[in-house]
Image (tube, rainbow, N blue to C red):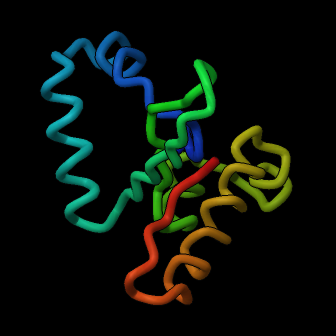
Amino acid sequence: MLAHHQSGLLNAADFTHALGVDGKTVASYLDLLVDLLLVRRLEPWHANIGKRQVKSPRVYVRDSGLTHTSLCPATQDDVLGHPVAGASWEGFVIEPLIAAAPSDTQANFY
């Protein structure tokens, strides 16, 4: 499910309804995947700009190979034609950018 929600805003309710588990269970599993460095939780940048604030983090599977393998494409054309292809590219680009940034840099999205 995380591969299909690649680079999307985290909505734990989607996972709880689809998996039939409690919200705390989804949160603890996601925390475990983040701790194991399999998933990146990118927090939003907050500023006091009004009511149009996004407070949900974006979730990325850190390894694009894992993302594509879990989507089960048969050919390269299947990968490029999948709706998650653009989001997968976004996750692929974010990882080296964050790695190249200075160590005291805090990564956020706007």
Describe residue 81's horizontal placement relative to residue 56 as left or right: right
Residue 92, x across and y down, in percent: 63, 68
Residue 7, x across and y down, in percent: 59, 46
Q: Is residue 92 above or below residue 85?
A: below
Describe residue 93's horizontal placement relative to residue 75 as left or right: left
Q: Is residue 6 above or below residue 68?
A: above
Describe residue 56's horizontal placement relative to residue 26 as left or right: right
Q: Nearer the viewer, residue 5 or 102?
A: 102
Describe residue 50's horizontal placement relative to residue 60 as left or right: right
Task: Specify the quadrant of the image occupied by residue 56.
Answer: top left
Q: Nearer the viewer, residue 77 or 31?
A: 31
Q: Is residue 97 above or below residue 81?
A: below
Q: Is residue 52 above or below residue 48?
A: above
The residue sitting at 58% across, 18% down in the picture is 51
The residue sitting at 40% across, 52% down in the picture is 41
Task: Specify the quadrant of the image occupied by residue 6.
Answer: top right
Task: Specify the quadrant of the image occupied by residue 106.
Answer: bottom left
Query: Which quadrant: the N terminus?
Result: top left
The residue sitting at 79% across, 49% down in the picture is 78
